Amino acid sequence: LVSPEYPGISLTPSFPLCYKHNRNPIKEAFFPMQLAKNLGYYLGFVAASALFLVVEHFTHIEFFLHVAAIPLEVLVAVFIVEKMLQRRETKERRRQLMFIKSHMFRTDMRGLFIANFRGLKNPAITMHQIKEASLEDLRTMRREAEAIEYRSPEAMEEIIREYVKAQPVWTSFMERAITYNFENIFLDMIYILHFINDVKAFKERYPDRLFIHEAERNERLMTKVRKVLNDGVQKFLDYAVELKEKQPRVFVDLMTDYEISDRMHLPRS
């Protein structure tokens, strides 16, 4: 798409409707492959059961009727076991991802989240408040973060710059989402990377202008800005709740680092 205000700026296409309607293209692509992989086994069990039913029909020996039920019972058992193993594997992958996120949040993404929380006008949440909060307090903060207001467009511009600087991190998250088959994370990363491309396209042509001022004149761009920035606050609080509940020591270490880094910044205006 080309910006009507700035014909020379090529903006990335709006995100596919599958994101808007919460569809998961990876899952939709993965499911037929998984089905095709196991289809031979499923057909084998069904064929065996059908064969014994045919034999029973011609011989009228009731024993074959009972035998015909065995492949179907085995098929149901295999299906249940597969689902249990998949859930266990997914749980373990999410646990691994939680520690990966802890590392990234404490290194490459620290400046981004600090800038995002420092830019908040309402709700005014600080890293110190998050660190000292109880689990219920964190959940309250998360509910309040459904409606976010920033201090100024300039504060939002600073956060946008941090998102662009963190582009390699978003790309890395996207690759991990593909590896672990986490469709929702993959879709979130694609959305953020499209947004970053919009920002970079604008800044390449107008390096002395603020992207947020252009977004204020373009409803579609402003919608993307608010979604990306608001999601950043909400995802951080989601992760804080998860750590506080499941890994309290990791939570304390993470938030101690954030509190120290936050104090090193200039006071809020």
Image: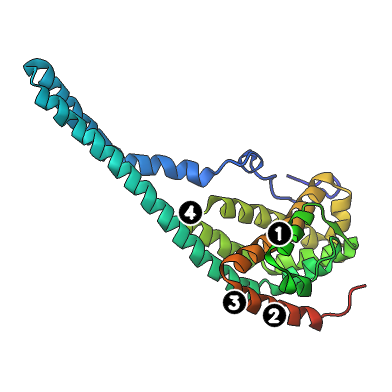
The first of marks 4 and 3 along the sequence is 4
Q: Position of residue 89 (x, y in %)?
A: 41, 57
Measured Cα–Cα span from mark 4 to mark 2: 32 Å
Q: Position of residue 31 (x, y in %)?
A: 43, 42
| Image-quadrant location for residue 197 | bottom right
The first of marks 1 and 4 along the sequence is 1
Q: Position of residue 165 (x, y in %)?
A: 70, 69
Q: Residue at label 3? A: 249
Q: Residue at label 4? A: 181
Measured Cα–Cα span from mark 4 to mark 3: 28 Å
Tally the numbered discs: 4
Can residue 179 be seen?
no
Q: Is residue 29 left or right of residue 102?
A: left
| Image-quadrant location for residue 16 | top right
The first of marks 1 and 3 along the sequence is 1
The amino acid type, in three-letter code, at marker 3 is: Arg
Q: Point out the frontmost of discs 4 and 3.
A: 3
Q: Point out the frontmost of discs 4 and 2.
A: 2
48 up-or-down from 197: above or below = above
Mark carried by residue 256:
2
The amino acid type, in three-letter code, at marker 1 is: Arg
**Residue at 38% across, 43% down:** 33
211 up-or-down from 84: above or below = below
Measured Cα–Cα span from mark 1 to mark 2: 19 Å
- In terms of secondary structure, where does tag 2 sit? helix
Q: Residue at label 1? A: 139
